[in-house]
Image (cartoon, rainbow, N blue to C red):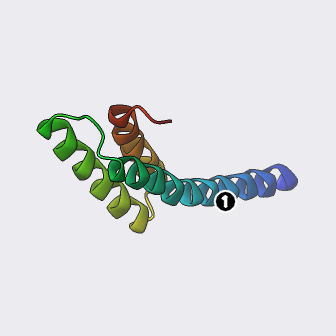
Amino acid sequence: MKKSLISGLFVMALSGSAFAMHCPADMKKIDDAMAKNPALSAEQMAEVKKLRADGEALHKAGKHQESVDTLGKAMKILKIM
């Protein structure tokens, strides 16, 4: 039982750091796509910028799953994945 608990905690720790590393990669994809001046409406552009900023703030706050989800919404608008 003790080994299972330790293994479970180890997996949880690794998954948190995996999400932490995913956020900057997603932010870079968004930044690269935005640099190419995508054909978006003003509303879509504003939404992407807001989602990008929110995703970075969540990342810095240690809320990596929320950050990945938020950045994913921006990537969906930009049609990148």
| Rendered location of residue 50, percent (x, y) | 22, 51
Q: Toward which corner of the image does residue 43 lie, by quadrant?
A: top left
**Residue at 42% across / 40% down in the picture?**
72
**For this view, does 21 lie left or right of residue 54?**
right
| Rendered location of residue 38, percent (x, y) | 30, 40
Up-down relation of residue 35 to residue 60 (above or below): above
Up-down relation of residue 47 to residue 26 (above or below): above
**Residue at 39% across / 55% down in the picture?**
31
**Residue at 40% across / 31% down in the picture?**
79
**Residue at 58% across / 60% down in the picture?**
21
- Camera-side residue of 20 and 28: 28
Q: Amino acid at mark 1?
A: Ala
Crowding near the residue tagged with mark 1, few <14, some 14–19, many ≥20 C-alpha atoms within 10 Å: few
- Camera-side residue of 3 and 62: 62
- Is disc 1 placed on a helix, strand or loop? helix
- Camera-side residue of 77 and 34: 34
